[in-house]
Structure formats: C-alpha cells, structure tokens
Amino acid sequence: MKKYFLIAMLMTIVLSSCEEDKIIFDGSQTLVAFSSNTVDLPIEIDATGSVDITVNVTTLSTSERTFNVTVVEDETTAGASSYSFGSIVVPANAYNGTFTINGVDDNVTTTPEKLVLRINEGPDYVTETESLTVNVFQVCPVDEALFTGMYRIDEITPFLPFSGPTLDNGGIIEVTADGLTRVFNTVNFPNFCSNPIPFTFNLVCNETVVPVQNTNCACNTGTDWFGPSTSGHANYDPNDDSVFEVTFSNDVQNDCGSGPVQTTYRFTKQ
C-alpha cells in the first residue's frame, strides 16, 4: 500500500511541475480587454484609412497607463506594410482608453484580409484571452446621394425552378444609403410570401456585392439564404446611377434543392 501511495505522490508532483504559472483574474487585479472582438478597417483606394479601438480596464488609476499590443503573426494575413498602430493609452481616472490602427492602400484589395492583435501581458495586470480581428480591405468612395431613390427592379435571369421571381419583379422600391451599403425593402418569392423585408447590397469599387443575408420565405430555414455571386459581380458606373445591376447567389444552402443559383436584377431609376 505504501508503494502505491508513494507512486501517486510522485505523479502528482511531476504533473504539477509541468503546469505553467498563470495569473487568473479573480477581481483583485486589473483586467485589460478589447471592447469588441472584430472591427473593420476600410482603406480608400490609393489612399489611407483608420479605425479607433476602445480598450476597457477594470480599475482606476490616478496616473495615465500604457499597454502594448502585439500582432498574432500566425493568424494574420494582412500585409505588414498596410497597417500600423501604437500603444493603448488609458487616461488617469478612466476605465477605458483607445489606440488607432492606421491603414494604407499597399497591395490591399476589396477582399478582406485579417490583422489579429493581442494585448501584451504585464506583471501587474491580467489580459483578456480573446484577440481582436481587424478586417482590412479596400473601398472606393461613392456619394451617398447616388444609387438611392426610387427604382424599378426587374429579374433578368431565369426564375428559380417552380418559385417564380426571387424579389419584387417589375415593382417600384426605394433604395437608401448607409455609407457604401444600399438597402431596400422587398418581398422574397412573391408567389409564396407577401411580407417585405430589407435586402442589402454593397458598392465595392465599381462592383455591386451582396453580403450573406437571410430570407423570410424558405422551404426550411432561411438562414444565410442570399450571398455573393460565384459567377462574377455586376459592375456599376460611379458617375451614372440611372441603371445598374445586382447579381447574387440565390438559395446558397440549397435549402429548396434548386440552388445555389446566380440571380441578376436590373435597377432602373424612376
């Protein structure tokens, strides 16, 4: 019996010695953490962009505090020449501070690349384990007055089998702007459903791109129903918003057994 007890004790000592000594936040230390896990850094074509990042701390100090940030190299795909940033500065008597990430259009494309950051550890504070992912991508400015207003929309591709048109077909809708995003309300599959919901597309450097979005009219689940075209995005003229087209993937998840199908709508200003 003594032999087995001794072996068990030795195993416990060995296993304990292999563990790292880690500081665990218990409320008595200062915790430093990003206020969000994901942000976008749009960079204007042939120019620059920036985004301010907020960082929270759990304690107050009568003096200014500085925390450093490190790039997680094995998770970052953005080119090192396309971004720069400094340290986090938390003013005295404050629970949060900021730092700025600057971007420059050096081999940046409209396809987002990832910059992953982590707050450096320190002897007198604890850092959040989750990192910050910055989506770095190129944008082309468009006046918010353009590609807005009343449009007639027509589906100019064959309808999905047995479903008829995807959105309003031949109807008049109003397009509104939020930066480079355009939104309008429309019925999804009017042969089956009648409640209009928002439909979104983005103006991405002379191309109209439909982000992944849901539908309220599906065979089973309407989650992630529409998405970017896999056959090429439609182009737009930044100086002429009288007529343009939007191409997108329809029934991305093949929920009804007929997708994904590439669907194109023509927008004609009224």
Image: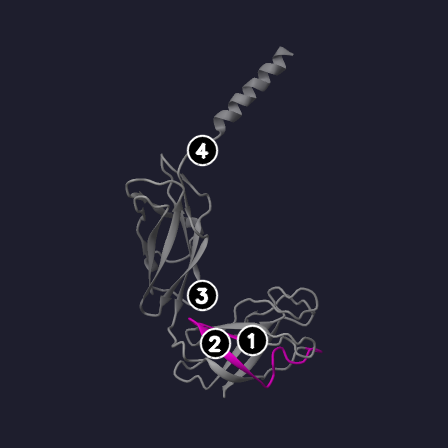
The first of marks 2 and 3 along the sequence is 3
Instruction: Give the residue at mark 1.
Output: 185
Of badges 2 and 3, the one in the foreground is 2
Q: Position of residue 22 (x, y in %)?
A: 45, 33
What segment carries the magenta color? 161-184
Q: Are marks 2 and 4 in contact (CB under 8 Å)?
A: no
Type of amino acid under label 3: Thr
Type of amino acid under label 4: Lys
Of badges 2 and 4, the one in the foreground is 2
Q: Position of residue 220 (x, y in %)?
A: 70, 65
Which residue does the image show at 68% across and 75% down from the upper left? 193
Q: Position of residue 109 (x, y in %)?
A: 40, 66
Compared to residue 20, the image places residue 103 above or below, namely below
Give the position of the N terminus as an image quadrant: top right
Instruction: Give the class, few, some or many, for how many residues have Cα within 10 Å of label 3's Cα (few <14, many ≥20).
Output: few
- Name the mark on residue 111: 3
